[in-house]
Image: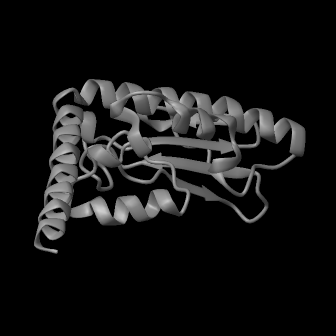
Amino acid sequence: MKSILHLCALAIGLVVLVLAGLRGLVLLGNSEERNVARAHSFLLLASSELDRWYEEAGSFPDDLNVLDCAGAQRAQVGVGEIFGGVLRAPLAELPATVGAVRRGALLDPWGNPWQFEMDEERIAVRLLSYGSDRAEGGDGPARDLELTKTGLRTALTHLDEEPVW
């Protein structure tokens, strides 16, 4: 019985060690420029997917997860994309981040759920990441990244365009 408990403790310790190592590798290879570029790419892809959806349905979808780009983001290969960025979330926020992924939320490159809002008529939509500081506002890599759409009119405020919604 004692040896089984020792083996269980050893197995748990090994799993924790492997996860800590993976997290370290992800954070070491995780530059802010790369994160900003990933976020820009996702917003541009989401913009074209939202346009396609709007042209076909006459309104925007209720959920970001129905877009093809959502599946593409989840299907990316590589340790850096495990669970869409869970390993990049701050340690204190890991339980909440894992919970968000379990509920189906897509994560931005900093491990936070993308904010997705829509008006009541479903003709205006907003997709937002608060950037590396995880707070509204900020400069540089901490700058908010936002896509707004009203019908087929689009603005990417992080590219210094005024929001259209």
Q: Is residue 31 left or right of residue 126?
A: left
| Residue 150 horizontal/vertical position (percent) | 70, 45
| Relative depth, front residue between 41 and 81 | 81
Image position of 23 with respect to 47: above or below: below
Q: Name the residue: 49% across, 26% down.
A: 41
| Residue 38 horizontal/vertical position (percent) | 41, 28
Image position of 84 with respect to 51: above or below: below
| Relative depth, front residue between 70 and 132 | 70
Q: Name the residue: 74% across, 51% down.
A: 61
Colour style of the rendered protein structure? one colour
Number of marks in the image?
A: 0
| Residue 19 horizontal/vertical position (percent) | 23, 46
Q: Is residue 108 visible?
A: no
| Relative depth, front residue between 153 and 43 | 43
User: Picture quarter containing residue 7?
Assistant: bottom left
Q: Is residue 154 left or right of residue 59?
A: left
Q: Name the residue: 42% across, 34% down.
A: 158
| Residue 148 horizontal/vertical position (percent) | 59, 43
Q: Is residue 30 visible?
A: yes
Q: Name the residue: 45% across, 29% down.
A: 40
Image position of 18 with respect to 4: above or below: above
Q: Is residue 20 left or right of residue 76?
A: left
Image quarter in which the N terminus is found:
bottom left
| Relative depth, front residue between 70 and 140 | 70
